[in-house]
Image: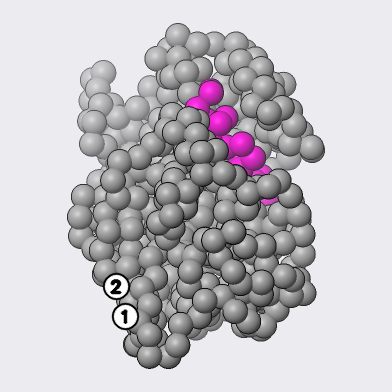
C-alpha cells in the first residue's frame, strides 16, 4: 500500500483534478465552496442531488494510523473518552436536508436516537454544497489541514481514491468484535467497493442502487401499453422507442407531454446503456477503456437518438415525471421517497434500461455507497458506535423504510415487516434491488480524473457538434491515459 500522502500532496490533489470535476456527472452516485455546518440536521443553503469480495468480515488486524494518532489497535486504544467526558463527532454528507424534507427528518432522527443512547456524545453535521465532489475534497483538504471530520457517507465515485491514499480507517478490527456488523449481513453488491488490499474500509449503507427508467403507469394504460414488468423488465431498445412515441402527446408541432426526458451525456449516464447493449467500460485489469466498440457505439447512438431523432422532448422547461410532463424519465431506484413527496398520487413504476441489439437482457449500473471513518479521527471508538447504530437493522427499518422509501444494504431489511409494509403501499418497489444482479458497476476507478478529462467531449456531443464514433475514440484515448497514471 502506498505511503500516506503528505499535506502538500493532499492539497495538490484536492486543488487539481478535484476542482474541475463536473458535479453533474457525480450526482448519480452525487470543487467546492463552503459547506453548511449544524449540530442538528440543519437548514441552510447547501444543495445536493442526491466484482466480488469476501462476504464476511476479516479477522482483526492492527490498524494503520496517521503519525498524529498513537493508537496501535483501534478497538483497544483509539482515544476513547472517559464516560464523563463530552465528545463531539462531525459527520460529513451530501444528502443535504435543504434538498428534501425527508433528509431533514432522517438526519434529525438518527442524531436524536444516537444521542439518547450516548448522552456524552454530540453529533454535528457538515452538508457539502458541492455534493460528492465537495465531500471528496473535504476528506483530503481538511485532513491535511488538521481539522478532519470523524465519519462520512462515502460515494463509490471516490472511495477508491481515499482507500489508496490511506485516508480511511480500516474497520476489520471493529468488524471482528461486532457480530451485528459482520459484512456477511450486508448485500454482496456492496462488498466490491469497500475492499482494498485485503482490508475493509466501509460498511455498505445505501443500496444496492441502480439507474432505472421511472414511468407513469397510468400513461402506459391510456396509450394501450402494458405497464407491468412482463413488458418493462423485458423490453428492448426498439420496444422502448415505440413506447416512448406512443406516450408522447403533441398539439400542432408542440410536444405537450414528452415520451422520454433527455439523458445528459457523461460517463456515468452512458454506462447503463452500454451494459444493456452487452458492453463493458473498463477492461478486466482496470487499465484500459473497453467501450470503443460496437457495443459502445450502439449504446451512445441510442442515447443521442432519444434526444434528437424521435420528437420525444417536452416543450415545457419544467416538465417532469412528477407533474406528468413526461411519461418516462431516466432515474434512480433511490428516488421513490422524493417522487412521492412531490406527488403522493402519482402511479409509477421502475424498470431496467432496455436491452440493446447486442445485449442479452435489460441491464443497468449499480453501486452501494458506504459509511466510513476518517483515519485521522481522534474519536474512533465513538465513531464506530455511531456508524453501528446508523447501519443497524432497527435504524434502517425505521428510516430507510419508514421515511426514505429507499433500499438499504442489509440483507435482512428486505424480509423485514417494515419493508413489507412499504411494499403494500408502494408495490413499484417490490424486488427493485434485484436489478443490481444484472447490472454493471459504477465507474469507480479514477472516477474524478476521468470525468474531468472527458468533460469537453461530452459537452461537445451535447451541443450537437460531436459524432458518436469520434466521441468514443476520444473517450478511449483520454481514458487510457488517465488509467495509466
Alpha carbon separation for disc pair 2 and 1: 6 Å
Under circle 2, the secondary element is: helix
Q: Which residues are magenta?
A: 437-454
Q: Nearer the viewer, residue 79 or 201?
A: 79
The residue closer to the viewer here, 369 or 351, is: 369
**Magenta-colored stretch includes residue 210:** no
Q: Residue furthest left?
A: 44
Whether residue 131 appears in this view of the structure is: yes
- Residue highlighted by disc 1: 112
Task: Tell me, yes or no, whether the two marked residues, 2 and 1, touch with CB atoms within 8 Å.
Answer: yes
Q: Position of residue 269 (x, y in %)?
A: 51, 35
Q: Is residue 92 above or below residue 236?
A: below
Q: Residues within 10 Å of mark 2 (few under 14, many from 20)?
A: some
Position of 330 with respect to 481 (left or right) is left
In the image, residue 265 sits, relative to residue 171, either above or below, namely above
The disc at residue 108 is 2
Q: Is the residue 121 above or below the residue 365 in the image?
A: below
Image point (54%, 11%), residue name? 467
Q: Nearer the viewer, residue 157 or 350?
A: 157
Percent x, y of residue 30: 44, 46
Residue 443, magenta (yes or no): yes
Tell me if mark 1 has few (under 14), some (14-19) or many (20+) residues whose alpha carbon lies within 10 angstroms of its own: some
Side (left or right) of 470 relative to 291? left
Work out which quarter of the rendered image holds the C terminus and state it: top right
Amino acid at each position: 500500500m502506498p505511503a500516506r500522502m503528505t499535506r502538500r500532496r493532499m492539497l495538490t490533489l484536492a486543488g487539481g483534478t478535484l476542482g474541475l470535476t463536473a458535479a453533474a456527472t457525480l450526482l448519480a452516485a452525487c470543487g467546492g465552496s463552503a459547506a453548511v455546518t449544524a449540530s442538528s440536521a440543519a437548514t441552510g443553503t447547501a444543495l445536493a442531488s442526491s466484482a466480488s469480495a469476501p462476504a464476511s468480515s476479516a479477522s482483526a488486524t492492527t490498524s494503520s494510523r496517521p503519525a498524529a494518532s498513537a493508537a496501535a489497535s483501534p478497538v483497544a486504544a483509539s482515544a476513547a473518552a472517559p464516560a464523563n467526558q463530552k465528545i463531539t463527532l462531525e459527520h460529513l454528507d451530501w444528502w443535504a436536508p435543504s434538498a428534501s424534507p425527508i433528509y431533514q427528518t432522517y438526519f434529525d432522527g438518527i442524531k436524536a436516537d444516537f444521542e439518547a443512547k450516548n448522552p456524552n456524545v454530540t453529533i454535528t453535521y457538515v452538508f457539502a454544497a458541492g455534493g460528492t465532489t465537495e465531500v471528496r475534497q473535504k476528506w483530503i483538504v481538511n485532513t491535511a489541514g488538521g481539522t478532519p471530520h470523524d465519519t462520512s457517507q462515502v460515494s463509490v465515485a471516490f472511495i477508491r481514491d481515499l482507500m489508496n491514499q490511506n485516508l480511511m480507517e480500516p474497520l476489520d478490527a471493529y468488524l471482528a468484535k461486532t457480530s451485528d456488523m459482520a459484512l456477511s449481513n450486508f448485500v454482496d453488491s456492496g462488498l466490491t467497493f469497500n475492499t482494498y488490499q485485503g482490508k475493509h474500509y466501509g460498511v455498505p449503507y445505501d443500496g444496492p442502487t441502480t439507474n432505472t427508467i421511472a414511468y407513469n403507469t397510468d400513461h402506459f394504460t391510456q396509450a394501450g401499453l402494458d405497464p407491468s414488468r412482463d413488458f418493462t423488465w423485458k423490453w428492448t431498445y426498439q420496444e422502448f422507442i415505440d413506447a416512448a412515441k406512443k406516450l408522447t402527446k403533441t398539439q400542432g408541432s408542440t410536444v405537450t407531454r414528452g415520451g422520454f426526458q433527455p439523458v445528459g451525456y457523461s460517463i456515468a449516464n452512458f454506462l447503463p446503456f452500454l451494459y444493456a447493449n452487452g458492453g463493458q467500460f473498463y477492461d478486466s485489469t482496470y487499465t484500459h477503456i473497453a467501450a470503443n466498440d460496437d457495443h459502445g457505439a450502439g449504446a451512445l447512438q441510442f442515447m443521442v437518438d432519444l434526444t434528437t431523432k424521435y420528437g420525444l422532448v417536452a416543450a415545457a422547461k419544467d416538465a417532469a415525471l412528477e407533474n406528468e410532463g413526461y411519461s418516462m424519465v431516466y432515474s434512480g431506484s433511490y428516488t421513490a421517497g422524493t417522487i412521492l413527496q412531490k406527488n403522493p398520487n402519482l402511479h409509477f413504476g421502475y424498470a431496467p434500461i432496455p436491452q440493446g441489439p447486442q445485449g442479452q437482457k435489460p441491464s443497468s449500473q449499480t453501486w452501494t455507497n458506504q459509511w466510513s471513518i476518517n483515519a485521522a479521527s481522534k474519536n474512533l471508538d465513538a465513531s464506530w458506535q455511531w456508524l453501528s447504530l446508523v447501519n443497524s437493522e432497527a435504524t434502517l427499518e425505521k428510516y430507510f423504510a419508514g421515511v426514505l422509501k429507499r433500499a438499504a444494504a442489509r440483507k435482512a431489511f428486505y424480509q423485514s415487516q417494515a419493508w413489507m409494509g412499504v411494499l403494500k403501499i408502494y408495490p413499484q418497489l417490490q424486488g427493485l434491488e434485484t436489478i443490481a444482479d444484472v447490472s454493471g458497476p459504477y465507474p469507480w476507478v479514477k472516477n474524478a480524473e476521468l470525468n474531468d478529462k472527458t468533460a469537453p467531449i461530452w459537452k461537445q456531443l451535447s451541443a450537437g457538434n460531436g459524432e458518436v464514433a469520434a466521441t468514443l475514440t476520444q473517450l478511449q484515448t483520454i481514458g487510457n491515459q488517465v488509467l495509466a497514471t
